Image (cartoon, grey):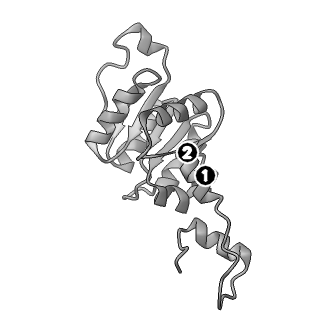
Amino acid sequence: MHTGSIFSDSSKRDRPRAVIYVRSESVRSWLKEVLLSLLNVVGEAADGSAAAELIRRLSPDFLILDFDHDELDGVELCRRTSAQFPNLNILVFTSAYCSTKYHNQLCRAGVRGFCLKSSEASVLLEAVSQLLSGARYCDPAIEQLVKQAPSTHMPNSELTEAEVAVLIRLDSRNK
């Protein structure tokens, strides 16, 4: 769904334009409210195809998406949009499971920031501010999980350290 007027007042014209792709309408509303001071939300989508169309049509400066697979894979959406819009700031707003499992793929696909759904509004604002300043951002909880060292004690294991590191990134620590 496309929001109302893009330019309802002069202060909005100066803010970067954003599209939010999150399935939950209540989460989209919360995001719009929190991001009001930094971004002008010009479009919202509840599925990948609608998000891709909005991004193509509106050429936003910012994309905030919940990494959730539907008919258009989230990694593929990020890859396509960052190829078409190389200056687009993409922030993944999702669970620890998805962000750690797909972290490396998403980084290669052009994602510049990661923020947990469970984060406070101040963390989300910090993430957006960092991306707007040209820096990358990774929620400290995600960074800790992604950089988690493999266990040194692995009885009956013939896996190499590199293979264990991959399993950790795939969130398969208990296997």
Where does label 1 land, which residue?
143
Q: Which label was assigned to residue 139?
A: 2
**Between 70 and 155, the one nearer to me in the picture:** 155
| Element carrying mark 2 | loop
Residue 131, image quadrant: top right
- Measuring 31% from the left and 48% from the top, which residue is drawn there? 23
Question: How many numbered discs, if any?
Answer: 2
In percent of width and height, residue 113 lies at 57, 42
Q: Type of residue at label 2?
A: Asp
Would residue 52 appear left or right of 151 to someone viewing this image?
left
In percent of width and height, residue 93 lies at 45, 45
In percent of width and height, residue 42 lies at 38, 27
Q: CB under 8 Å between callouts 1 and 2? A: yes
Residue 10 sits above or below residue 27 on the image = above
Mark 1, residues whose alpha carbon is within 10 Å: few (<14), some, or many (≥20)? some
Q: Residue furthest front?
A: 153
Is residue 79 shown to the viewer in this render? no
- Measuring 63% from the left and 39% from the top, which residue is drawn there? 136
Residue 159 sits above or below residue 67 on the image = below
Q: Residue furthest top?
A: 10
- Measuring 45% from the left and 37% from the top, which residue is drawn there? 55
Residue 103 sits above or below residue 34 on the image = below
- Measuring 72% from the left and 73% from the top, which residue is drawn there? 162
Q: Type of residue at label 1?
A: Glu
